[in-house]
């Protein structure tokens, strides 16, 4: 099966990207895997100022995945430009890199995009509109506020010609509407989904397992949530979609493709095995070959294949109507 795919004017050697927050700026994983063996990666989210991150423990496992509250730990805009992007430019050959950016205001997002737009080493930006762990901001993420989505995407659109992905939230009751808003505001693609807000407590004390309290849930538990959101987005936008949430096996990735993902990202699986990304890429190729599939692109549902009126498995008509209203 041909796993290479053309999007955003470039060739991804396979549709597997390492998700933001799971591979640092590439350099952190370069000793344990060949980054050019995956289609690409998304950097840790960059903020204007350096961020030390939240109190430890920042991650905890549970039976269906993990929960994190890293708290946007990153070196900040200046150090990212000085130390991180030059390493990527010098060392990455074929992997397609997106720089994730996270701000507290529209203006901060715009300054981040403007600040890195002239640098080498990456193709585009992923706008992190959906961080569940930003204590400084508090409240629901930008992705749950349609006006904020429109303003941030449009503001960044005005400042760069590079591809812009908008990363949306798993707990959006109407991911389709948000997808349409991000599309109208000028995004080039949408990434669905970020982690799902959650909380784990210790039985003995009732204290949270994470130092920061709550966090974002990822891993297998997130997969049905991500697939639902991505399918809702597919019904309302023509843009390429990037699926993320609980992907480990070729079957998981193909399920995302079947509801519209042109690319997939692997996140939590990389923590258990840093080579999970290349293993998935190789597994996908084998999966397709064994089934006589000519190309990954043949598996990807286009906008017309998933219509708003289509029945969702397991939904009653009434709930489907509520969901679409
Ligand atoms: O740094 C984090 O705690 C974090 C971020 Br920015 C995000 O977007 N998603 C997540 O699960 N953790």
Image (cartoon, rainbow, N blue to C red):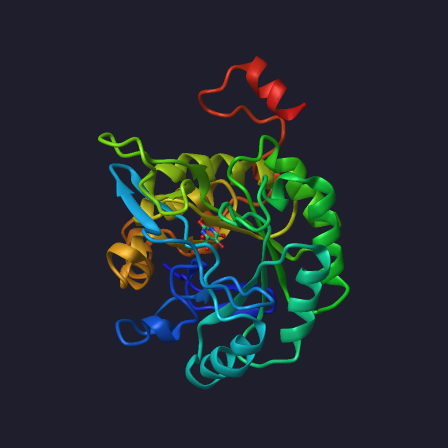
Residue 13 percent across, percent down from the top left: 43, 68
The part of the image, by quadrant, that contains residue 23 is bottom left
The part of the image, by quadrant, that contains residue 303 is top right
Q: Residue placed at 39% from the left, 39% from the top?
A: 223
Residue 280 percent across, percent down from the top left: 31, 57
Q: In this orientation, does residue 292 appear?
A: no
Q: From the viewer's perspective, is 208 left or right of 45?
A: left
Residue 169 percent across, percent down from the top left: 54, 42
Toward the front, the furthest residue is 205
Q: In this orientation, does residue 83 appear?
A: yes
Q: Residue placed at 41% from the left, 34% from the top?
A: 224
Whether 37 is drawn above or below 282: the answer is: below
Whether 258 is drawn above or below 272: the answer is: above
13, 271: nearer the viewer: 271
Q: Residue placed at 51% from the left, 62% from the top?
A: 45
Q: Pick the quarter of the image with the C terminus.
A: top right
Residue 9 percent across, percent down from the top left: 60, 69
Whether 134 is drawn above or below 176: the answer is: below
Q: Residue placed at 33% from the left, 55% from the top?
A: 284
Q: From the viewer's perspective, is 230 left or right of 182?
A: left
Toward the bottom, the furthest residue is 90
218, 239: nearer the viewer: 218
Q: Pick the quarter of the image with the N terminus.
A: bottom left
Total marks in image: 0
18, 214: nearer the viewer: 214
């Amino acid at each position: 099966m041909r796993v290479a795919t053309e999007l955003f004017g470039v060739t991804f050697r396979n549709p597997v990207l390492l998700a933001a927050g799971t591979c640092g700026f590439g350099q952190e994983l370069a000793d344990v895997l060949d980054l050019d063996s995956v289609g690409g990666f998304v950097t840790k989210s960059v903020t204007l100022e350096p961020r030390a991150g939240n109190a430890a423990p920042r991650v905890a496992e549970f039976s269906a995945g993990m929960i994190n509250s890293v708290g946007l730990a990153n070196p900040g805009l200046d150090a990212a430009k000085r130390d991180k992007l030059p390493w990527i430019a010098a060392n990455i050959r074929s992997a397609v890199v997106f720089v994730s950016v996270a701000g507290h205001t529209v203006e901060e997002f715009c300054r981040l995009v403007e600040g890195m737009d002239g640098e080498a080493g990456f193709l585009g930006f992923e706008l992190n509109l959906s961080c569940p762990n930003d204590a400084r901001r508090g409240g629901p993420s930008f992705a749950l506020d349609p006006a904020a989505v429109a303003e941030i995407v449009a503001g960044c659109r005005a400042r760069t010609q590079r591809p812009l992905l908008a990363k949306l939230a798993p707990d959006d009751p109407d991911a389709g509407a948000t997808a349409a808003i991000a599309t109208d505001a000028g995004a080039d693609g949408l990434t669905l989904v970020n982690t799902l807000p959650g909380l784990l407590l210790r039985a003995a004390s009732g204290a949270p397992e994470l130092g920061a309290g709550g966090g974002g849930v990822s891993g297998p538990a997130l997969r049905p949530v991500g697939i639902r959101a991505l399918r809702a987005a597919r019904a309302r936008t023509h843009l390429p979609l990037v699926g993320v949430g609980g992907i480990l096996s070729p079957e998981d990735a193909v399920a995302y493709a079947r509801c519209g993902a042109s690319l997939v990202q692997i996140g939590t699986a990389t923590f258990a095995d840093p080579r999970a990304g290349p293993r998935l890429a190789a597994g996908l190729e084998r999966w397709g070959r064994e089934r006589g599939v000519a190309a990954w692109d043949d598996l990807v549902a286009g906008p017309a294949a998933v219509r708003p009126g289509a029945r969702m498995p397991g939904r009653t008509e009434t709930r489907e109507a509520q969901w679409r209203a």
